[in-house]
């Protein structure tokens, strides 16, 4: 029976989950796969993290993992760009297969890493980088390989989805929802990664590579976060039959043009993604052969992500010791026309905070009309003693640039008391 020796870099939440699984389930995994998986070494700078039962595996430097000739597979789970990038390159150049969950690194330097892996005749696996335990990477690479992917819509950040969910369920503002999410350990050390859509953009870049064969520069992915969303917007959207979600979106618009964006969107309550609640993730894919499919599950967390890492490890086992491997992810970079959001058209939800006096609605609608933006419905909310009141509109389809120009003019009106909020409708 072949033994596969594992070196682990990082003993945080996921690293400890992987180590625990390998320790407790070695015989079961051996029975299922026919391979003996042995955790040989652990590199972790914070020695206090390592329980006594793993201390004999702890090494003083990462190079003792990446340079060890006895190790077949290196699992990198420290996250971030540096020093993870140098660790993975070292492992690949030392002929180690590598598993990572590092979506930021893959989004920024994936092409380089896949190129090195191909040159060194080893494999780089990354199922855990998107969607936690959801098998979306292997599905795009294998199960859906015959399809031309027409579109991807994903709820791929559990923190933002949790925040939007409890804002709706408990009728609380963003600041309070964020505090609750932080207390439950759902928020990154840098909350901008979640709230501003950065994490979602990293994951979208990986999905685009698999679906369309090229890695986009992150600067070319249009990105908005959820920090400006109010509990009022969530309530008013529901009254109109919609739910607000932070979506990662890729759509093939023509033979050579890909539309790529991350932003909050209004989804009809009947949409398959609209019912995804809490920290769960879901990815909707439309292919020319398979039609519409949805992948749903826990997008993060110790055990779901461990599941994805172990799946990669088992797949790699068959290649350990082989002289020839094919790094299928190492596509040559294709030239692609990337759609500009300014050229797209959407229906919009718009909320104005305005002085409660006659003629306000006429001024707003007049400016919208000047930019060829039609109003489908309008409601003035909570009229009464307040100095300003919400005016909520749903528009007909309009050009993005025209909408931005119209809102800039409306915001300058003396009767408008706050920056208008507008959210695109996605169907």
Image (spheres, rainbow, N blue to C red):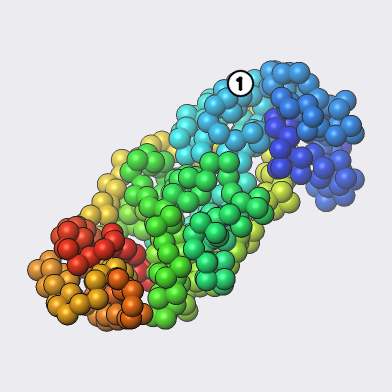
* 412 and 374: which is toward the camera: 412
Query: Tag 1's secondary structure?
Result: helix
Q: Residues within 10 Å of mark 1 (few under 14, many from 20)?
A: some
The residue shown at (23%, 55%) is 342
Where in the figure is residue 399, as x and y percent of width and height?
20, 63
Q: Indicate the quadrant containing the C terminus: top left, top right, bottom left or bottom right.
A: bottom left
Q: Is residue 55 visible?
A: yes
Where in the figure is residue 351, as x and y percent of width and height?
31, 69
Q: Quadrant of residue 71?
A: top right
The residue shown at (43%, 56%) is 226
Image side of residue 225 versus residue 186, left or right: left
Where in the figure is residue 91, as x and y percent of width and height?
64, 24
Q: Is residue 2 visible?
A: no
The answer to whether 136 is drawn above or below residue 206 in the figure is below
The residue shown at (14%, 78%) is 359
The residue shown at (16%, 63%) is 413
The answer to whether 289 is drawn above or below residue 10 in the figure is below
Residue placed furthest toward the front: 385
Give the residue at mark 1: 90
Image side of residue 261 versus residue 314, left or right: left
């Amino acid at each position: 029976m072949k033994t596969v020796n594992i070196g682990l870099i990082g003993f945080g939440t996921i690293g400890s989950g992987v180590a625990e699984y390998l320790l407790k389930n070695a015989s079961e995994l051996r029975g299922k796969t026919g391979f003996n998986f042995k955790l040989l070494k652990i590199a972790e700078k914070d020695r206090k993290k390592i329980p006594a039962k793993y201390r004999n595996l702890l090494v003083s430097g990462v190079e003792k993992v990446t340079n060890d000739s006895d190790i077949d597979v290196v699992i990198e789970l420290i996250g971030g760009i540096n020093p993870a990038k140098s660790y993975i390159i070292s492992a690949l150049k030392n002929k180690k297969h590598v598993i990572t969950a590092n979506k930021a690194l893959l989004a920024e330097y994936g092409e380089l890493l896949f190129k090195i892996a191909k040159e060194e005749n080893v494999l780089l696996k990354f199922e855990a980088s998107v969607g936690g335990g959801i098998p979306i990477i292997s599905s795009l690479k294998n199960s859906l390989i015959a399809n031309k992917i027409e579109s991807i819509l994903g709820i791929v950040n559990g923190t933002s989805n949790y925040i939007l969910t409890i804002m709706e369920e408990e009728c609380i503002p963003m600041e309070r929802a964020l505090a609750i999410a932080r207390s439950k350990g759902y928020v990154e050390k840098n909350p901008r990664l979640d709230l501003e859509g950065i994490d979602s953009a990293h994951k979208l870049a990986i999905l685009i590579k698999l679906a369309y064969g090229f890695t986009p520069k992150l600067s070319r992915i249009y990105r908005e976060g959820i920090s400006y969303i109010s509990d009022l917007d969530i309530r008013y959207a529901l009254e109109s039959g919609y739910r607000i979600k932070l979506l990662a979106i890729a759509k093939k618009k023509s033979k050579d043009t890909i539309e790529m964006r991350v932003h909050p969107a209004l989804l009809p309550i009947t949409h398959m993604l609209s019912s995804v609640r809490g920290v769960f993730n879901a990815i909707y894919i439309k292919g020319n052969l398979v039609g519409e499919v949805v992948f749903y599950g826990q997008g993060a967390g110790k055990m779901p992500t461990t599941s994805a890492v172990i799946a990669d490890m088992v797949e790699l086992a068959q290649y350990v010791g082989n002289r020839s491997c094919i790094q299928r992810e190492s596509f040559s970079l294709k030239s692609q026309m990337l759609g500009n959001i300014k050229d797209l058209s959407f229906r919009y939800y718009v909320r104005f905070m305005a002085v409660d006096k006659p003629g306000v609605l006429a001024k707003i609608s007049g400016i919208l009309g000047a930019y060829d933006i039609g109003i489908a419905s309008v409601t003035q909310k909570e009229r009464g003693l307040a100095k300003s009141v919400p005016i909520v509109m749903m528009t007909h389809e309009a050009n993005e640039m025209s909408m931005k120009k119209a809102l800039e003019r409306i915001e300058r009106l003396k009767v408008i008391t706050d920056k208008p909020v507008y959210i695109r409708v996605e169907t």
